[in-house]
Amino acid sequence: MVKRILQETKEYTLSAYLTPVFMILEVAMEMVIPLLIADLVDKGVEKGNLSEIYRIGGYMLICAFIGLFGGIMGAILGSKASAGLAKNLRKKMFENIQTFSFENIDKFSTAGLVTRLTTDVTNVQNAFIMVLRMGFRAPVTVIVAMILSFRINVRLASNFLIAMLIILGFMTFVLVKTRPLFEKLMKRYDDLNASVQENVTGIRVVKAYVREAFEKRKFISGSDGIYKAATAAEKMIAFTMPMMNLVVYTCIILISWFGAHAIVIDETLTTGELVSLFSYCMNILMSLMFFAMIFIMITMSVASMRRIYEVLEEKTTITNGADPIYEVPDGSIKFNDVVFGYNKTAERPVLDHINVEIESGETIGVLGGTGSAKSTLVSMISRLYDVDEGEVIVGGHNVKEYDVETIRNQVSVVLQNNVLFSGTIAENLRWGDKNASDQEVRHAAKLACADEFIEKFPDGYDTHIEQGGTNVSGGQRQRLCIARALLKKPKILILDDSTSAVDTATDASIRRAFREEIPNTTKLIIAQRISSVMDADRIIVMDDGKLNDIGTHEELMASNEIYKEIYEQQTGAGSGDFDKVDQEGGVKNA
């Protein structure tokens, strides 16, 4: 996992390698200065030798400037490497997310992906810079300071060793306890982000139903969950600093006591050497405190790294075959004993042995109750999902034989959830064809009956669309999405309940335009309104994941109870009154 994450340093590898070098240079200068201080005290101050004081003081200044240079360069290069790692991680994760099939996307919540791209990457970035700088600086400081301390006085230096072992043991205990708490904290962030995203996306519904107070309580509950998880972790970490201070000051007291005894009674230690030992003591113990900070950061980042790693290593379930086909001959479709389920362990599949054949250019209506798998059925055509059993054949070839991009370019889908992106109307429509001319854009809008309201906007096709299309009505949003799909000039056009928000007259106009303008395009229209599909060449009736029947409106009215029941519920007509239904949508007044 760590190796995979570090692969994203890429062009910042040199900065990552040079950071520890400059940090070690800084440490080296810091370790030389206490030795110079000892000489300054013993050879200069105590003997009153002013020239020696100047000489040693000059060396100390040189060491200080070299150490300052090393510290500054280490900070600059470390920041560059860590920021570069974060940038590459976000880029790589986002690129991989774009390859995901719907099955992959279903594994991760939207809020979870947002948290991984933001908070988790920031945690890894902070841990990486800490490791590059303090992760190398601290151990080198401890090792060099311990060696020099033992050279000065073994007995006094032994205190450092004991203190170090106590601190390391305590740090290990804290890390073991806090790691699961930080993992729990990141999951709480996911829950809170999901709550915020849901609230902001559905703010109109929240206000319409006066549910602000409920949403506030839900947010407070999620925020309180983060507070409790963070507090639980911080309570453990809170003991770290007092424990460090206790060990540090105890160590200083012991050095002072035994050092004074060694100078006055044993005469085995000089005053300058004692001052050096104090410096090394602080260096060692401060480095251990930095170690504690590093391990805390690593503990937090391990949970984040695992979540990032999951996204980076997730492989799309839908890929090209060995020799993909790059051209779809026509819009013919055949479902050959298709079985599919979202949950592979479920007792029964969502689509249960579907067999149907559709000719190129046909208009097919798809009707059925809620949960009858109408949308699931058509999502197999463009490989938004892959079948579990059987095969879907388009243009005489199994859809798995096509290049994924090719089949999706030739199967234009207007989904139930009509999404527009921030930008102008023209920019949104050109999602269908980025190279479309203004004339082609206007023609597609006219077919979708969208030009009539676009022209009424002051800026026309340059009108800005807010994120999600919140500044246009539901019906306008649906017509813009249909126009966008038509610009692809697809072999197959799928409308998944995408005219539910338009009036029946507009719905009829759109269907008439389809018949006249794109007769060779296979059209599959999923609808709740029977008037939207009754003039189709054939109508598929879905029931609980199975193909209940298929036929024309007249055939189904004569033989299919489900279809007849839907018709009578929506029109209020008797079984013999279907001839009163206006083929352009709606019921004639009797």
Image (cartoon, helix red, strand yellow):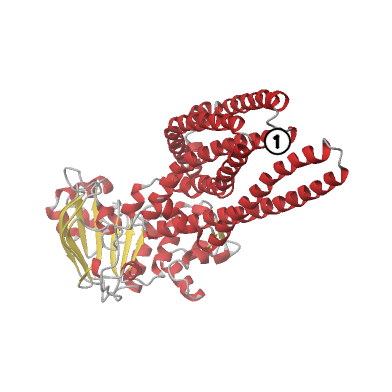
Q: Secondary structure at mark 1?
A: helix
Q: Position of residue 484 (x, y in %)?
A: 43, 65
Q: Position of residue 245 (x, y in %)?
A: 62, 27
Is residue 534 visible in the rendered structure shown here?
A: no
Q: Nearer the viewer, residue 341 or 299?
A: 299
Above or below, 378 against 273 in this view is below
- To which residue does mark 1 refer? 273
* Outermost residue, left side: 559
Question: Which residue does the image show at 61% across and 30% down from the upper left?
Answer: 156
Near mark 1 (Cα within 10 A), the count class, few <14, some 14-19 or many ≥20, is many
Question: Which residue does the image show at 81% across and 50% down from the upper left?
Answer: 58
Q: Position of residue 249 (x, y in %)?
A: 64, 25
Above or below, 405 against 66 in this view is below
Q: Nearer the viewer, residue 138 or 463?
A: 138
Q: Nearer the viewer, residue 531 or 498?
A: 498
Above or below, 208 against 20 in this view is above
Is residue 560 visible in the rendered structure shown here?
A: yes
Q: Nearer the viewer, residue 11 or 394?
A: 11
| Badge count | 1
Question: Which residue does the image show at 30% across and 75% down from the upper left?
Answer: 326
Above or below, 117 against 505 in this view is above
Q: Which residue type does callout 1 highlight?
A: Glu
Classify residue 420 as left or right of residue 515.
right
Classify residue 104 as left or right of residue 274.
left
Q: Position of residue 201 (x, y in %)?
A: 48, 45
Examine the image and state in which quarter residue 418 appears. Answer: bottom left
Question: Which residue does the image show at 45% across and 61% down from the upper left?
Answer: 480
